[in-house]
Amino acid sequence: MVTLPFEKHMCELKVKIDELKELSIDQNIDLENEIRQMEIKLYNMQKKSYANLTAWDKVSIARRVERPTALDYINKIFDCFVELHGDRYYGDDSAIVAGIALFNDIPVTVIAQQKGNNTKENIKRNFGMPSPEGYRKALRLMKQAEKFKRPVICLIDTPGAYCGLGAEERGQGEAIARNLMSMSTLKTPIISIVIGEGGSGGALAMAVADEVWMLEHAIYSILSPEGFASILYKDVSLAKEAAISMKITAQDLIEFGVIDRIIKEPLGGADTNVDEMAVSIKRNLEEAIGRLICEPIESLLTKRYYKFRKIGKVVEEI
Amino acid sequence: MFEFKRIFQKSKYIEVKNLGNDGDKKPNIPSGMWVKCRTCGKIIYIKDLENSIMTCENCRTHFRIGSKDRLYYTLDEGTFIEYDEFMISDNPIDFEGYTDKLEIIRNKTLLNEAVLTGEGKINGQDTIIAVMDSNFMMGSMGSVVGEKITRAIEKATDNKKPIIIFTASGGARMQEGIFSLMQMAKTSAAIARHNERGCLYITVLTDPTTGGVTASFAMLGDIILSEPNALIGFAGKRVIEQTLKQQLPEGFQRAEFLLQKGFIDKIVDRKVMKDTLSEILKIHS
């Protein structure tokens, strides 16, 4: 596991604790008091640093290869997940995993952007960067969910929509635009959760939802901090500074009213305890799905429209 | 051509300025009386260029034009009523230098933002219209562009009127961060409602139309027209080249390429744009 800069001291302390534990067993010395004190110290250090992460720390956490991906959650949150493939026009995009499942006996449609847990998997998943056929598969299954009156749950985790020759030829822009338009009037509840990276239009194409949530250390942005730095500062090495000024953390975005809810992560990030994270997401979904499926569709759609309608800051001079 | 060159050499006070090439087609009206088309090299008398609606008679190159000129060429004279004329940008993510930059650009371009919206008539037919302007921060979409376009669409929806949007944009306005991204959802949702009321939406893609504008309202027209050779795409050419580590084919992301791939309905010369729009409106009236 790669240690991030802010985790260095904590890692060193953890190594010391492990050494002491080993020592106490090997030499049969009672070090329980010392170990406990150090553990308390570690806990306090973790609590403090994870509450004060910089935007760049969060970028690093959201991108780390150990971070749980959509499939890590899907099987823990839903029952009988049946994956469905293909857009019916061109192909199947493995950067998007989608299918039907039961959520506490309620049928739902799950659509997720899928990164890999290692390089090999990442190549298969195209690093979670969907192609037009991925967005079209997502839309096909959303329309299917509408037909069968199933709520849609989208898990967002992408650096952005794929930028390639084929993606352009097959209309990446059109595919994203079509999703934005169709999701805004889809006659079934939609909940989108940013679990890692929410990269630009590629993320938004699955996030025109009744409720948009983010995990505590997830990010959601107009562009990668590297791209932003290279465009506005003409220097890609200023990505850290860009991350801060872009305001991309869950905490920034809830203040702006762009997202509705932050789901707390286990101490040390979602990867330290996937089960706990999944349970937490599930509890939040239980409350929201129960509420949204009771809401009349017309009122749901009106609220969804105004949720996005009101975003933007302008000055009107008279 | 030879004749022109001789004239040019003799009369030193006649200024010839280059105008337009593949990368830079800003329609800077030169102070001189002659301009040179960078695509074919033809020297054009400025009045002729204006008479040909800023297109080169020789090679069909369409120079970029501003939103006010576009309205002048598209609507019946004196019929334009502007909406939200005085709406200007705030600085939603407190991005350093953005407020000052806007002020400078407003003064330089004499525009309040990167889009003009309003209503007018095309050969006597009512329409709501929005025209983007690449002279204002490359036509990028921030809160103001999103809000003005959304209001124009809503007005069209409420009054069951058609809307025509001329796009010209480098994409989302980076300086407004996530607020810019959300304008894509906002405008597309407004188009969805307009669509559900059975109203006509025409987009005219002009050079350049890329990024967040392509990935939202630009690609959602019932009918999508484009000017010849306009650059239209989602990702920037350089980004794709870096991703693929290879050169892109000739004509990639040009209007003709998109027509061939099935993403636009028709390429229309600027000279016949008004009449084409008029015919489409007539068929839907």
Image: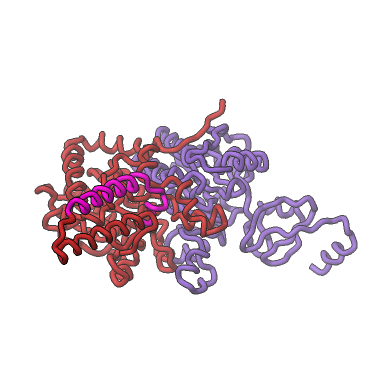
* Left/right of residue A318 with respect to residue A165 in the rendered view: right
- Chain letter for purple, please: B
Horizontal and vertical percent position of residue B223 = 44, 52
Question: Looking at the rendering, in which quadrant would you find the C terminus of chain A?
Answer: top right
* Observer able to see residue A28: yes
* Observer able to see residue B283: no
Q: Colour of chain A?
A: red
* Left/right of residue A122 with respect to residue B230 in the rendered view: left
Horizontal and vertical percent position of residue A117 = 27, 65
* Left/right of residue A41 with respect to residue B157 in the rendered view: left
Horizontal and vertical percent position of residue A257 = 37, 37
Q: Nearer the viewer, residue B4 or A9?
A: A9
Q: Nearer the viewer, residue B206 or A286?
A: A286
Name which quarter of the figure residue A6 lies in. bottom left
Name which quarter of the figure residue A2 lies in. bottom left
Q: Nearer the viewer, residue A104 or B68?
A: A104
Q: Nearer the viewer, residue A65 or A179?
A: A65
Name which quarter of the figure residue A175 lies in. bottom left
Q: Looking at this view, name the residue that lies furthest to the right.
A: B10
Horizontal and vertical percent position of residue B285 = 44, 41
Which residue is at a point 58% across and 45% down the rendered structure image?
B74
Question: Looking at the rendering, in which quadrant would you find the N terminus of chain A?
Answer: bottom left
Q: Which residues are magenta?
A: A32-60
* Label tally: 0
User: Would you say residue A53 sits in the magenta stretch?
Assistant: yes
Which residue is at a point 51% across and 67% down the rendered structure image?
B252
Mainly helix, strand or loop, the magenta region?
helix
Residue A106 to residue B226: above or below: above
Which residue is at a point 18% across and 39% down the rendered structure image?
A287
Residue B129 to residue B206: above or below: above
